[in-house]
Amino acid sequence: MKKILITMLLGVMVSGCGTSNNVEIIAHRGASYLAPENTRASALLAWEKGTDGVEIDVYLSADNRIVVRHDKSTKRTSGVDLMVAQATSQELRKLEVGSWKDPKYAGEKIPFLEEIIETIPPKKKLFIEIKCGPEIVPLLKKTIVESGKIERIVIISFNLEAVAQAKQAMPQVPAYWLLSTKKDKETKQYLPHDPKNLQIAQDRGLDGLDVHNAGVTPEFMQAVKECGQKLYVWTVDDPIEAQRLVDLGVAGITTNRPGWLREQLKSAQK
């Protein structure tokens, strides 16, 4: 009888778990744990590791080119302090942004957006995070349309106006509003995400939210499902936390370690 009860209990536990096969794994700035972030090398390595999508960051340069870059300045990864928005694309392309991560990546350049788009394999997605404002939208649309891969693009941004205008300009492209998790001012504990933001996203025509993982609670996830939106989360490298989010039913998880995290989730399922 004891053996039967244990078997039944294990069956309940397994049936209650979500499956990692249904969640998209998104490589944060490419496979940035191993390769220099926001470079062709990091994107190519992420695709090689079987990620479902790659997330990159974009700015407009002073001469109106879309460059792939996270920081406002180039100093952290190049050693040269240039403000991206105030530098020309020619100045930015002279910088070397690979060797800070590993000498084998010496020679990596700050890519243009089109150079990353061309790496997207069939049935994969490129998540483009707008780091500046709505002024990028016309050129962003032109670049995406001319790439011939519009069906593989997703737009995200913390700037609500930028992502909303991108969605308006390209209705067929999924677009998500990025949000951080707020903390209690006294306890410094993370607070649940506010369901009101789901309504804001819906009112602006967006497809859902892309939020920091700590504020995702069962109640918030239920609100997401009730309004028919999708929820992506960032940036998760902990397999236990990733499994919690899978069980809640998130659409995708952004991680610095796409190949490794997928294997950890698969192992947990076994």
Image (cartoon, rainbow, N blue to C red):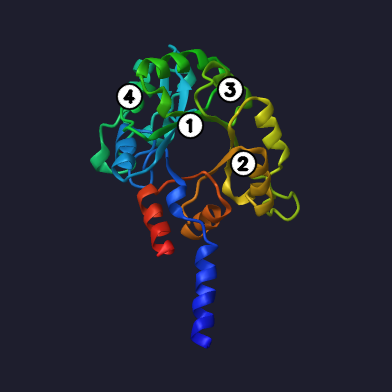
Q: Amino acid at mark 1?
A: Asp
In the drawing, what numbered circle is on residue 180?
A: 2
Which residue is nearer to you in this view: 92 or 29?
Answer: 29
Residue 156 image point, x, y percent: 53, 31
Distance from the alpha carbon under mark 2 to that under mark 4 = 29 Å
At mark 2, the secondary structure is loop
User: Which of marks 1 and 2 precedes in the sequence?
Assistant: 1
Q: Splitting the image into 4 quarters, where does residue 233 fall?
A: top right
> Of label 1 and label 4, which has the lower sequence position?
1
Question: SS for tag 4?
Answer: helix
Amino acid at circle 2: Ser
How many residues crowd around disc 4 within 10 Å: few (fewer than 14), some, or many (20 or more)? Answer: some
At horizontal 67% and vertical 36% (from top left) the residue drawn is: 198
For disc 4, the marked residue is 115
Can I make out residue 72 in this image? Answer: yes
Q: Earlier in the sequence, mark 2 or mark 4?
A: 4
How many residues crowd around disc 2 within 10 Å: few (fewer than 14), some, or many (20 or more)?
Answer: some
Give the Cα distance between marks 4 and 3: 22 Å
Query: What amino acid is found at the position of numbered circle 3 in the picture?
Result: Ala
The residue at 35%/50% (across/down) is: 259
Q: Which residue is mark 3?
A: 162
Residue 83 visible at all: no
Q: Which mark is residue 71?
A: 1
Work out how far the residue at label 3 is from the one at label 1, CA to CA, in angstroms: 18 Å
Please identify, in this view, whether the residue under mark 3 or under mark 1 is nearer the observer.
3
Residue at the limit of the structure toward the bottom, as seen here:
1
**Mark 1 neighbour density, 10 Å: few (under 14) some (14–19) many (20 or more):** some
